[in-house]
């Protein structure tokens, strides 16, 4: 693996760790999410800004769950990957491969296949929409 790839991989892991931490730090006693404070989560500001959008996508492809019942690391991995899929020019195959590899390291036994399934369906639907089908 080249240094550039390793650097991108490490940045993804950092964003996932930050997203994971943010989930705990910003939930108040009512389960609602509060605003960002003091730039502590500036590295993931764009991910946080689109959390509702990403959660809708996650629930679309995992309808038997509520966001509150998901493993928080699974959510962090998915949210980071969805940000890349929707808002960057990173090739979808790269985003999915990276998310699956990170899932194997940080998630449960089921996380990698779950992440692959959700992201694969998002990419397939986006491809169908762009093809006009």
Image (cartoon, rainbow, N blue to C red):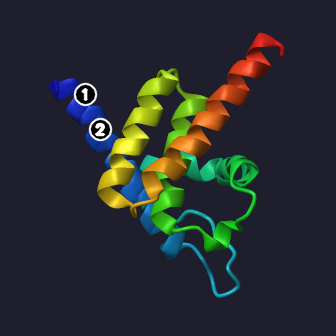
Please give the residue where the numbered disc 1 appears in the rendered image.
5
- Dot 2: element: helix
Label 1: how many Cα within 10 Å (few below 14, some 14–19, many 20+)? few
- Return the x and y of residue 94 as percentages of the image width and height: 41, 27
Mark number displayed over residue 38: none
Q: Is residue 89 above or below residue 65?
A: above
Pick the residue in front: 3 or 58. 58
Q: Quadrant of residue 8?
A: top left
Measure how far apart labels 1 and 2 are at the Cα level: 6 Å
Q: Is residue 131 left or right of residue 18?
A: right
- Residue located beneath label 2 in the image: 9
Residue 113: tell me if it is visible.
yes
Q: Which picture quadrant has residue 17?
A: bottom left
- Horizontal side of 72 relative to 17 (left or right) equals right
Q: Position of residue 1 (x, y in %)?
A: 17, 27
Residue 133, image x and y in percent?
Answer: 83, 16
Please state the horizontal and vertical placement of residue 97, each as a whole percent of the image: 40, 34
- Contact between marks 1 and 2 (CB within 8 A): the answer is yes
Which residue is rendered at x = 70% and y = 48% of the image? Answer: 61
Q: Is residue 38 visible?
A: no
């Amino acid at each position: 693996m080249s240094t550039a790839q390793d650097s991108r991989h490490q940045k993804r892991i950092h964003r996932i760790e930050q997203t994971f931490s943010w989930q705990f730090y910003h939930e108040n006693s009512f389960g609602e999410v509060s605003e960002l404070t003091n730039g502590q989560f500036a590295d993931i500001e764009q991910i946080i800004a689109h959390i509702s959008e990403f959660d809708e996508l996650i629930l679309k492809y995992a309808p038997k769950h509520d966001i509150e019942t998901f493993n928080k690391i699974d959510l962090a991995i998915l949210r980071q990957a969805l940000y890349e899929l929707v808002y960057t020019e990173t090739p979808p195959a790269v985003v999915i491969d990276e998310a699956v590899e990170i899932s194997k390291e940080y998630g449960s036994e089921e996380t990698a296949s779950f992440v692959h399934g959700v992201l694969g369906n998002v990419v397939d639907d986006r491809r169908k929409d762009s093809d006009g089908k």
